[in-house]
Image (cartoon, rainbow, N blue to C red):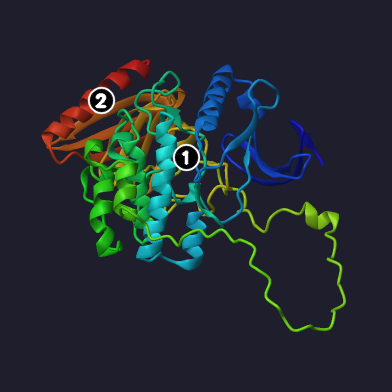
Amino acid sequence: MERIGGYLVERRLGEGGMGTVYLARTRGGRAVALKVAKAELAADPVFRERFRSEVEAARAVGGFHTAPVVDADVDGDPLWLATAYIPGPTLAERLAAEGAMDEPRLRSLGAALAEALESIHSCGLVHRDLKPGNIIMAADGPRVLDFGIARAVESTRLTATGTAFGTPGFLAPEQALGHDVTGAADVFALGAVLVAAAGGAAWGEGTPMGLMYRSVHEPPDLSAVPSALADLVSACLAKEPADRPTPTALLDRLTGQAPAYPPTVLTTPQAATPRAATPPQPLTPPQAATPAQAFAPQAFTPPPQPATPPHLPAQPATPPHLPAQPATPPHLPVQPATPPPPGFGPPPVPYGGGYGSPEAVLADAQSGVVVGAAGVLLEVAGAAADFPWNEIAHVERHWRGNRLTVIVRLWDGGVYSCELNARRRARLTAWLAQLDPVLARYLTR
């Protein structure tokens, strides 16, 4: 078997956008999740600097509800990071197998996540992607994993302005809008996780654009949340970051002043009590464990490799404005069918996968337009198509009333359009103010 950084690799657990994660063991037999970066990424000096920053951030996080970093190589080839291997299903898998949680289990889950956020925020960090797929339901309680896109609050040097990291459906409004992000965004995500654990969806189902739009403009759906927790979850999902409780305040409300835990009793030797003599029993020596038993992995079946990368391919055969059948029905959930393996989540890229950092994001409840350094992405009723700048001859935009139409004309003669409903003139004006400078920057003619 292969050795990486002195660790003996047993098997591959899965693969993500940054690389591959393996189940490996120390020379003494302890299990670790070993994340190895892709060779093409490791060759990029910018990625190496970001990887170093993320390792330092992850090392700083402690607490009972996170997976500790035990080792890393930020200078070698390959780049790798080792975290404690935590067996158990993700929260997403647990909910799929067992269904919604009742109120006591929701309180326990919320308290554990709030405690994890306390540890993360106390180090000046923001997780930015708390969701059921990044929470392992370990035997000793939930663990928050994947600090792959966490960023130090005091350092924005490696974070592009206007970039929306995270997962639609759990993104705070300020994340969806590309504004500054604080620990309050993680509290918002915690509220959305509790809604999901209760069997609901805070923003319903639909396209990423629709989910982001509703998280910014509409109230959450809390119909699945027990009434005793509805006010608390609603506070977590407040639109304004300042209106959300802190993790410490959440702990106070979820556990009360003094949780009723059973006392811990230290056993002491008791005085011998005379007993009737019994015939001596034959001694049976304990059965020795075999080497295979001593070093066998803990009982856990990792989820399979994610089905597809997050890049959205262009769909030249059917313009997105036509009422054609979309490649992916809009009622499907945004998350991939299989959550990422424990300890290794999605890559640290903005919404849209490999599309690039968005500089202009325009969206209503059904459609959206994203423009960035890589090109233009149009999404209409679940059908998405992206066009790189070298294929685009011209981009037009015109409006009637409060409806804005964006038209992409390609050099090969293809024409694609997307209509957005701003509903208010002020929002239409803001869209144009955001869109026009970006088009002027990248269009050559």
Asked if 297 appears above or below 273 in the picture, the reply is above
Q: What element carries label 2?
A: helix
Asked if 338 appears above or below 313 in the picture, the reply is below
Dot 2 crowding, Cα within 10 Å, few <14, some 14–19, many 20+: some
Q: Which amino acid does label 2 sit on?
A: Gln
Name the image quarter holding residue 158: top left
Q: Which of 260 and 357 is in front in this view?
A: 260
Residue placed under numbered mark 2 in the picture: 434
Cα distance between the residues tagged 2 and 1 = 23 Å
Q: Is mark 1 on a helix, strand or loop?
A: loop
Q: Which amino acid does label 1 sit on?
A: Leu
Residue 415: x percent and y percent? 36, 35
Do the residues under discs 2 and 1 have CB atoms within 8 angstroms? Answer: no
Name the image quarter holding residue 165: top left
Q: Which of 26 and 388 is in front in this view?
A: 26
Residue beneath the point at 85% across and 79% down = 280
Asked if 100 appears above or below 191 in the picture, the reply is below
Residue 84: x percent and y percent? 62, 42
Residue placed under numbered mark 1 in the picture: 312
Residue beneath the point at 43% across and 50% down = 112
Does the image show residue 412?
no
Q: Which of 306 and 412 is in front in this view?
A: 306
Residue beneath the point at 69% across and 22% down = 76
Name the image quarter holding residue 188: top left
Mark sitting earlier along the chain (2/1): 1
- Left or right: residue 242 compared with residue 377: left
- Left or right: residue 366 compared with residue 293: left
Asked if 52 appears above or below 318 in the picture, the reply is above
Residue beneath the point at 26% across and 22% down = 436
Residue 45: x percent and y percent? 58, 17
